[in-house]
Image (cartoon, rainbow, N blue to C red):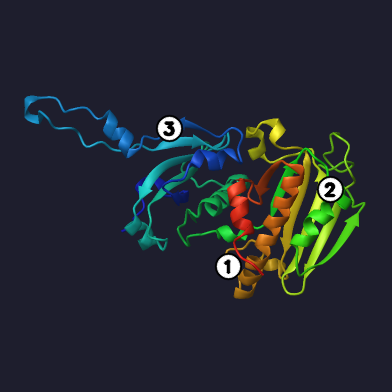
Amino acid sequence: MSPLPLAVDGHHVLAVPDTTDLLTLASAWFAQADWLTAPVTASQARSRARPMSGARFRGMVADPEPQPGELRLTWEVSARGPYPLPPDAAHALGLPARSYDLYAVVPHEDPSRPVADPGVLAWMSAAARRSAGAILPADRAQIVVPDPRSSVDLTLWSAVALAPEAAVPLVRPLLSGARVAVATGLPAQHGEPGGPGDRGGPAAPAPYELVATYPYDGEVRLRFSRSSEVPVVLTALDWREYGPFAYRVAWLPPEDAEYRTDSVTPLHAIARGRIAPYVARAVSALARAAGGAVVDSDGYLVDDAELTARAASTSR
């Protein structure tokens, strides 16, 4: 017998730890995310419970039940839940034995079919990775548990444009063990000045790239550019907290095929563990100099505490 509630049958399901705020995860990707119907938790249900009427039931209170809600993701898709999954049921499914909340992701047009929107499916993967959750595909063939450690790349969005001669001295000492080269005058990419999607904006140095090469662990690349497009998550901040100048610090592992996959070799995992702190340290140094907001490769804000933890997670 399946430990899953009937309400999620036939749908892709996002399983997140029961302390997770799903609206925060959704708002980082979808500007229109909002509760259409807010869920009622067990504690809220108990507080609203009324004594049963009639002499026979005097003093008795009906056993309150939590009620799922409906969270709009896009104008065409909603997430329905939460449906509690207790630790024993989670363990039976192959997940860590802890309490989860389940959300069925449902298209409005045909609620009988699983959602097929690529953007929504990508969000489910990002949200599961960010929350240390999982995805239960509609066919239930195999639970997908994205590895939170695979989110290595970081981008600083700042109102300050640092020229390469200012950025390199900040970053170079933090990339110990690497050979560092700087390339300037790079071709403009989408959203950059002179590139596709350019809508004009403040003047800035031409795009440049700093490349740190490690003998066994691949490369760390810092690319600076101005962009006319920013992640959705930044639009919730005051405009003075970020800017159009992007400092993208990314890891290029020796084996591209393993990048951001959920099943990697031990050598890839070791290299990722060595490189991830360097990425965080470089971004932290840039943030101290230029200010701004840091966003991870899944589109979520990284605060100072998380950035510090990433930078200190291991040493070479």
**Location of mark 2 (residue):** 189
Q: Earlier in the sequence, mark 1 or mark 2?
A: 2
Q: Nearer the viewer, residue 184 or 76?
A: 184
Image quadrant assignment for residue 261: bottom right
* Residue kind at label 1, given as amino acid type: Ser
Quadrant location, the N terminus: bottom left
Residue underneath mark 3: 38
Residue lying farthest left? 56
The amino acid at mark 3 is Ala
Q: Quadrant of the C terminus?
A: bottom right
Horizontal side, residue 160 vs residue 151: left or right? right
> What's the CA distance linking mark 3 and mark 2?
41 Å
> Element type at marker 2?
loop
Residue 141 in the image: state x and y as whole percent: 47, 61
Residue extending farthest top: 54
User: What secondary structure is found at the residue carrying circle 3?
Assistant: loop
The structure residue drawn at horizontal position 79% and vertical position 38%, both measured from the top left corner, is 228
Residue at image mark 1 = 263
Q: Against 152, is 106 above or below?
A: above
